[in-house]
Image (cartoon, rainbow, N blue to C red):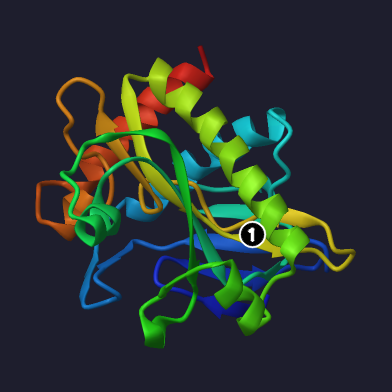
Amino acid sequence: MTLLYEGKAKQLFTTDDDNVLRLVYKNDATAFNGEKHDVLDGKGQLNNAISALFFGVLEAEGVQTHFIEQISDTEQLVRPTEIIPLEVVVRNITAGSLARRLGWEEGKALSKPIVEWYYKDDALGDPLVNDDHIAALGVAKVEELEEMRKRALDVNNVVLDLCRKANLLLVDFKLEFGLQEDGTLLLADEVSPDTCRFWDAKTKEKMDKDIYRYGLGSLQAGYENILSRIGGVVHD
């Protein structure tokens, strides 16, 4: 097995099958573009389990993903893709950079989801871009953007439904997509509290990476709560 890629929270390895890669979730926690970094026991295991749950439900609902199966506490098998260097962010409630950028109070429910694009470039801090910027950068075709937007909203609908049943608010989330060799677009990366903001529906308690980002308590406890709630809904 050869290491193909290592990011802040995951490693990607080859396998004996050219059509299958091994994705390993690490215990690393980072925030503020890597300025804050710790290794937290059990984090990789929790993200792997949560992401596998979400991917399984999304696949069942007709959303094509790179996920094949979970093979251990920290590992998944996934389909290889060429990642499009864009993060697709869907927002249902004001928080984070959206609230800061527009001077909105955190926690305001939006009348409809807002979809944003961010150019994946660590050196630039993953800047917010629009369709014209993306065309100038040449990183995605118009039809690919349209399909990514549609699928991101499909993901939003599926995960919102799960969250309602689990007494959670899906505040916002970021997705990444990749292309297979034949041009098929797949949802890639992960769907976890590292990439989604989850709040308790009643108390508005944060149960995602903001716990670590802002020093609000035990990240693992928050992620375990998410796993328990979502797992309870999926396996009901």
Q: Is residue 37 left or right of residue 174?
A: left
* Vertical comparison of 136 with 214: above or below: below
Q: Nearer the viewer, residue 89 or 58?
A: 89
- Residue 70 shows up from this direction: no
Q: Position of residue 19 (x, y in %)?
A: 82, 63
For disc 1, the marked residue is 177
Q: Is residue 99 above or below residue 223?
A: below
Quadrant placement of the N terminus: bottom right
Q: 96 or 216, which lies in front?
A: 96
Image: 181 above or below 205: below
Badge 1 crowding class, 10 Å Cα cut-off, few under 14, some 14 to 19, many 20 or more, is: many
Which of the pair 30/170 is nearer the observer?
A: 170
- Give the residue drawn at x 41%, y 82%: 122
Helix, strand or loop at disc 1? strand
User: Which residue is located at x 73 percent, y 68 percent?
Assistant: 15
Position of residue 151 relative to residue 230, above or below, is below
Q: Amino acid at mark 1?
A: Phe
